[in-house]
Image (cartoon, rainbow, N blue to C red):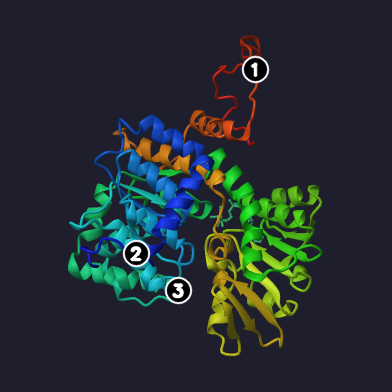
Amino acid sequence: LDLKLNSKVADMKLADFGHKEMQLSEREVPGLMELIKKYGDTKPLKGLKIAGSLHMTIQTAMLIKTLHALGADLRWASCNIFSTQDHAAAAVVDAKLAKVFAWKGESLEEFWWCTEMALTWEDGSGPDLIVDDGGDATLLVHKGVAVEKDPSLLKKSYDNKEFQVVMDRLALSYEKNPKHWTEIAKKIRGVSEETTTGVARLYNMQKDGTLLFPAFNVNDCVTKSKFDNLYGCRESLADGIKRATDIMIAGKVAVICGYGDVGKGSAQSLRGFGARVLVTEIDPICALQAAMEGYEVVTMEEAAELGDIFVTATGNFHVITKDHMLKMKDEAIVCNIGHFDNEIEMIYLETTPECKRINIKPQVDKWMLPSGRSIIILAEGRLVNLGCATGHPSFVMSASFTNQVLAQLELAKENNLKNQVYILPKKLDEEVARLHLARLGVKLTTLTKEQADYLDVNPAGPYKSEHYRY
Ligand code: NAI
């Protein structure tokens, strides 16, 4: 690591464009602007170092601007090799809001270098707080500590290519300082995690007793997963598919794998364009929901031959397999909107000599298969909305990121949190929603005292019980 390196982005000449887009987004991020107004003077994050690993987009630039306005000292990396918007990264560096290590089209080695750079300040010290998306920054710290406890982990070789890259990086830091990550972990007050996949990793660590610091599950704020995952994907999925392929969606058969929040938004989006949407599910509740919405629920074995467009939205792995790909129609479009590329068995394509890759343009590849047919893979199987388009619009990210900032503020308070996963109180969730009403001209009805008594709720909220599901 070159700790003297200030930042590494693609092109600082893009900063001006980035500034203009950040300015344009201000009206669309009312939650964040309100936080700047509320806490800009008192700066509750003053003196705290925050490392971020989250798609370096214009929306994230506004999150960084907010955390900076609240006093934080920030370093940032993207959480996906394709998701950086280079003008956003340049603008953040130019405005000195954060040190940024991110550009569109990183290699895996560069990606993990960037993650480590975001976690390591000029003097070699680490962050007080982490903002994570998918859990990669948290993973690097935890694996680093695991290696320092048991250096024999470095001698093994790992089948998983990306995991091997992580271990190679950790070998370098272990050589320099065999206590580096242990010291970094000790200082961390906590992490706030953005997405379903990262949250699942945190709960796994909590279950195993290996979680090294407190964590906030931001994803399961209602104003995050029931908005960003659902309405965000409802807009950004089709954007990604269209920018990549220009395909007419109307009349096509689209197959959505997984009918959780992301799947629901994705299915509704493609149906909205006029596609006939098929859904696959493993959970009877979600399968029934899909059926009740009028989608045909099938298995991938059936759907493989029928689909023109396939979208995985499960957070699971190998949901579209080699066998499915071999059955597909010629030039079927295959993409993933879940967090990691292994939802599609990319390893089959990448390691089978008979599978030939023809690059059409960045993030669009035609793969010739032994079936004699071809399929079009978007963003190399990584999340299509951020790889092939610009991710979710600012307004929905404002709700997500307002929750992120509130979680960071909770972690910043000295309040004896344990090494477990926390959720923000419902009152704050309602507050995040409230901050986004005026922009949409929503007129909220106020409960009368009598009505509040009748429902047995406080007229100022929270309005629902903890078990309410929205
Ligand atoms: P979720 O848990 O609500 O939904 C996933 C669904 O997939 C579940 O209903 C599950 O039963 C189903 N599933 C699991 N294995 C399956 C299989 N083999 N076949 C068919 N269905 C299967 O999760 P959510 O919030 O919808 O997130 C899904 C993924 O999308 C996660 O990886 C998450 O991190 C990611 N995500 C991506 C976003 C983006 O902008 N691209 C935004 C938000 C989340």
Decide if residue 292 is on the left or right side of residue 166: right
Which residue: 56% across, 45% down? 396
Which residue, given by chain and number where applicable, does mark 2 sit on? 114
Near-viewer residue (394 or 139): 394
| Quarter of the image where one finds residue 251 | bottom right
Question: Counting other residues with Cα less than 10 Å from the Cα at mark 2, is it few (<14), some (14-19), or many (20 or more)?
Answer: many
Near-viewer residue (205 or 313): 313
| Disc 3: residue Cβ within 8 A of ligand 1's nearest atom | no
Amino acid type at mark 2 = Cys
Amino acid type at mark 1 = Leu
| Quarter of the image where one finds residue 271 | bottom right
Question: Where does residue 213 sit, x and y in percent of width and height?
Answer: 33, 46
Q: Residue 382 carries which label?
A: none
Disc 3/disc 2 C-alpha distance (Å): 20 Å
Quadrant where the N terminus sits is bottom left
In the rendered image of this protein, does residue 287 appear above or below residue 321?
A: above
Question: Could you say whether the residue bearing mark 3 is in a helix, strand or loop?
Answer: loop
Disc 1/disc 2 C-alpha distance (Å): 51 Å
Mark nearest the camera among 3 and 2 is 2
Q: Which mark is residue 455?
A: 1
Question: Counting other residues with Cα less than 10 Å from the Cα at mark 3, is it few (<14), some (14-19), or many (20 or more)?
Answer: few
Which residue: 55% across, 56% down? 391
Which residue, given by chain and number where applicable, does mark 3 sit on? 160
Mark 3 or mark 2, which has the lower sequence index?
Answer: 2
